[in-house]
Image: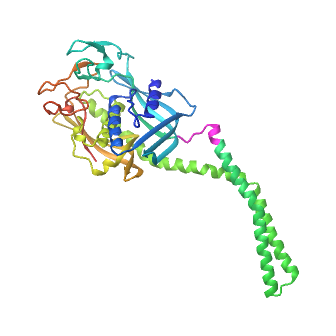
């Protein structure tokens, strides 16, 4: 599973700036990636990611936490990375972000470890054999589209967190450089201070001797006092200078930690709401895995935000989004969803939730980052339970019998009939 995570990070490097397709993440993430790519190209922008290993857990680190339902298991993997994101237009950098981070990924797999990607399945329409992995994109012989479950293992979600930790070389090299420069500046200032203070005292003596007829011995005492001040300054700063430089070198990291801690404080309280939502869903016999649902929700929200017309998406039934969302070119999930309210009316479950994100927007050549909470309302028919076993079945329009990809398209391309996704999956009612 860890190799899937590292493959995903490698694929993300040029997934938005080239025609390369993501294969290591689930199709929800693949879909919003495709739509995001269209948004970037329509605006003449190029967005590059780069995740470069730092020597810690190069193949990813598996954590003890895991979540299971009747068929799947989800695990958390992490890796330490140098992370860079660059937004460009015509090779001109509009926004660059670079930092050391911990990448956290949720990887979903079959509980029993089954692998059926390369199994041969006969197309129900034309009878030709094909690999199961090929049929998820439609029959390669007759083009018939199918309703299929996801093929795992896949990355279903990820987020990045600022990582203040440093390897010895990463910590000591910049710290010693800053400390050395600061110490050298302080030591070099000692003779400068001595010269300046002495010159001022001599000038005072001359003025006093000229104006006030001060005795010579008194003027010499004034000069000695100035030299004493200079010597005292030198004695005071010579030895503490390296320590002061070392402390000053740590201040940017401490400030960054304080700022990130303040940003993340509100996120911690959201996890109390997850249990409430899980218990409510189980009342209606819904097979439920919190991390899976959260990941699918975030992916759908991203796809709707990036889409020029969200109403074309099969899982969106809300009003048109505000015009300012057209400027959003990257939505970074901050790892928290807060469930506000759940109600079931006529077998349709409605859930209100907040999705915590950081968005990158571009308008007229100016790009900016800002934290943003999206208020989302979703619904699903709770009479239909989630299918656990993998299956491949032909999908046909209920009205005209035309086969089409109902996962990416709401309306049949032949008769324009709308396929009601909420009968089988969650759909978005609104995003604010």
What residue is at 25 percent from the left and 12 percent from the top? 128
The N terminus lies in quadrant: top left
Query: Where 107 sits versus 320, above or below?
Result: above
Q: Magenta segment range?
A: 163-171
Question: Is 55 situated left or right of 136 in this image?
Answer: right
What residue is at 77 percent from the left and 61 percent from the top? 234
Question: Is 21 situated left or right of 236 in this image?
Answer: left
Q: How many marks?
A: 0
Residue 275 in view of the camera: no
Q: Position of residue 199 (x, y in %)?
A: 78, 73
Residue 52 in view of the camera: yes
Q: Position of residue 312 (x, y in %)?
A: 22, 38
Q: Position of residue 432 (x, y in %)?
A: 28, 48
Query: Where 218 sits versus 302, above or below?
Result: below
Q: Position of residue 22 (x, y in %)?
A: 38, 29
Residue toward you, 387 or 199:
199
What residue is at 63 percent from the left and 50 percent from the top? 249
Query: Where 222 sits versus 320, above or below?
Result: below
Seen as rendered, the residue at the extreme front is 90
164 within the magenta span: yes
């Amino acid at each position: 599973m860890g190799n899937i995570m590292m493959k995903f990070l490698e694929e993300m490097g040029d997934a938005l700036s080239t025609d390369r397709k993501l294969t290591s993440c689930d199709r929800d993430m693949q879909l919003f990636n495709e739509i995001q790519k269209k948004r970037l190209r329509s605006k003449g922008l190029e967005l590059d990611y780069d995740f470069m290993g730092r020597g810690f857990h190069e193949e990813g680190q598996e954590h003890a936490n895991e979540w299971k339902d009747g068929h799947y298991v989800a695990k958390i993997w992490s890796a330490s990375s140098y992370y860079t994101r660059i937004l460009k237009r015509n090779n001109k950098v509009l926004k660059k972000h670079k930092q050391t981070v911990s990448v956290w990924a949720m990887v979903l797999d079959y509980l029993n470890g089954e692998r059926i990607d390369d199994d041969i399945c006969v197309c129900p329409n034309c009878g030709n054999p094909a690999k199961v992995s090929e049929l998820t994109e439609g029959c390669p012989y007759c083009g018939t589209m199918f309703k299929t479950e996801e093929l795992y293992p896949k990355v279903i979600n990820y987020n990045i967190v600022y990582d203040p930790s440093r390897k010895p070389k990463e910590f000591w090299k910049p710290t010693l450089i800053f400390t050395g420069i600061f110490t050298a500046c302080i030591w070099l200032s000692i003779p400068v201070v001595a010269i300046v203070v002495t010159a001022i005292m001599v000038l005072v003596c001359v003025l006093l001797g000229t104006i006030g007829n001060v005795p010579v011995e008194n003027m010499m005492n004034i000069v000695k006092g100035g030299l004493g001040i200079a010597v005292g300054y030198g004695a005071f700063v010579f030895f503490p200078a390296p320590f002061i430089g070392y402390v000053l070198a740590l201040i940017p990291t401490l400030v960054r930690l304080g700022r990130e801690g303040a940003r993340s404080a509100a996120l911690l309280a959201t996890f109390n709401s997850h249990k409430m939502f899980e218990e409510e869903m189980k009342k209606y016999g819904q097979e439920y895995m919190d991390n899976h649902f959260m990941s699918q929700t975030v992916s759908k929200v991203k796809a709707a935000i990036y889409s020029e017309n969200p109403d074309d998406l099969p899982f969106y039934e809300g009003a048109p989004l505000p015009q300012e969302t057209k400027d959003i070119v990257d939505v970074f999930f901050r790892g928290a969803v807060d469930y506000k309210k759940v109600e079931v009316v006529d077998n349709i479950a409605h859930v209100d939730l907040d999705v915590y994100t950081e968005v990158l927007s571009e308008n007229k050549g100016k790009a900016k980052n800002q934290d943003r909470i999206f208020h989302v309302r979703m619904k699903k028919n709770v009479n239909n339970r989630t299918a656990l076993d993998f299956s491949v079945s032909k999908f046909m329009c209920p009205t005209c019998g035309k086969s089409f990809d109902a996962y990416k398209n709401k309306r049949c391309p032949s008769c324009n009939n709308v396929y009601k996704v909420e009968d089988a999956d969650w759909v978005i009612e609104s995003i604010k």
